[in-house]
Image (cartoon, rainbow, N blue to C red):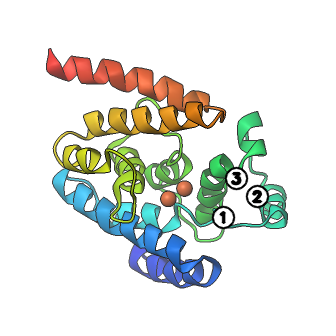
Amino acid sequence: MKDYKDIYKEVDRKIKSIMTSKRYQHVIGVVNTSSKLADIYGEDVQKCRIAAIFHDYAKQFTKDQVQQTILEYCVKLDILEKDSIQLSHSKLAAEIAKKEYGIYDEDILNAISFHTTGRAYMSMIEKIIFVADSIEPGRKYPGVEAVRDLAFHDINKAILMIYKHTITHLLNSDHKIHPDSVTARNYFIDKNKEVNI
Ligand SMILES: [Fe+2]
Ligand SMILES: [Fe+2]
């Protein structure tokens, strides 16, 4: 069985060849940021690096590649995911990690699978990838510095700020909001209250 370092190198070479350099730089930003967060929150750095290098693997797939992956790996997508590569690329990447690269660690697969929407009861690795995706150095949006600062001190509060930003953006641009994001936001509102009691 290949170890995570070999798989990382293999995926790194692959994504470099199928992504724009801007997207690749984003992925490397997520790898580096997730490693730092893993150190701070006592998580497995190798697992975070693997989840991060895979997370946007399918983001630039053509419609044909999306269809082919769905059919080949029997990927189950919900109605919103079927409609949007913004949502489906997470699920496709998780299936590719499992079926093409032999990643069976549920925590890694879930971190890839839920990196766009997040979800309630996320594990620490899931939280790290979700947050790293939003705060890597290439990310620029109003308030990103505040989220970056918070991410290294209180990851649950950082997640709530990310939802505030992304859901506001989705509302303002008349886009649909995935129910996992809404449920997760409600969960993290309660979670942050718990901590403050
Ligand atoms: Fe993504
Ligand atoms: Fe990403």
Please state which amino acid type lies under the numbered disc 1: Lys
Question: How far separated are the C-alphas under marks 3 and 1?
Answer: 20 Å
Asked if disc 1 is less than 8 Å from ligand 1, the answer is no
Closer to the chain start, of discs 2 and 3, is 2
The local secondary structure at tag 1 comes to helix
The quadrant in which the C terminus is found is top left
Residue 82 seen from this side: yes
Residue 169 in the image, given as x and y percentages of width and height: 52, 38
**Tag 3 secondary structure:** helix
- Mark 1 crowd level (few <14, some 14–19, many ≥20, 10 Å Cα): few
Picture coordinates of residue 82, whole percent (x, y): 77, 44
Q: Residues within 10 Å of mark 2 (few under 14, many from 20)?
A: some
Q: Along the polypeptide, which appears first: circle 2 or circle 1? A: 2
Which is nearer the N-term, disc 3 or disc 1?
3
Q: From the viewer's perspective, is 117 left or right of 130?
A: right
Whole-number angstrom distance, CA of label 2 to CA of label 3? 17 Å
Amino acid at circle 2: Tyr
Q: Nearer the viewer, residue 55 or 182?
A: 182
Of 92 and 1, which appears nearest the observer?
Answer: 92
Total tally of numbered discs in the picture: 3
Residue highlighted by disc 3: 85
Rendered location of residue 138, percent (x, y): 39, 65
Query: Viewer-proximal residue, 148 or 9?
Result: 148
- Give the left or right position of residue 164, taking residue 90 as reference: left
Q: Is mark 2 within 8 Å of ligand 1?
A: no
Q: Are marks 2 and 1 in contact (CB under 8 Å)?
A: yes
Residue 73, which numbered label? 2
Q: From the image, tell me which residue sits under label 1.
A: 99
Distance, label 2 to label 1, CA atoms, is: 7 Å
Tags 2 and 3 in contact by the CB under 8 Å rule? no
Q: Quadrant of ligand 1?
A: bottom right
Q: Is residue 122 visible?
A: no
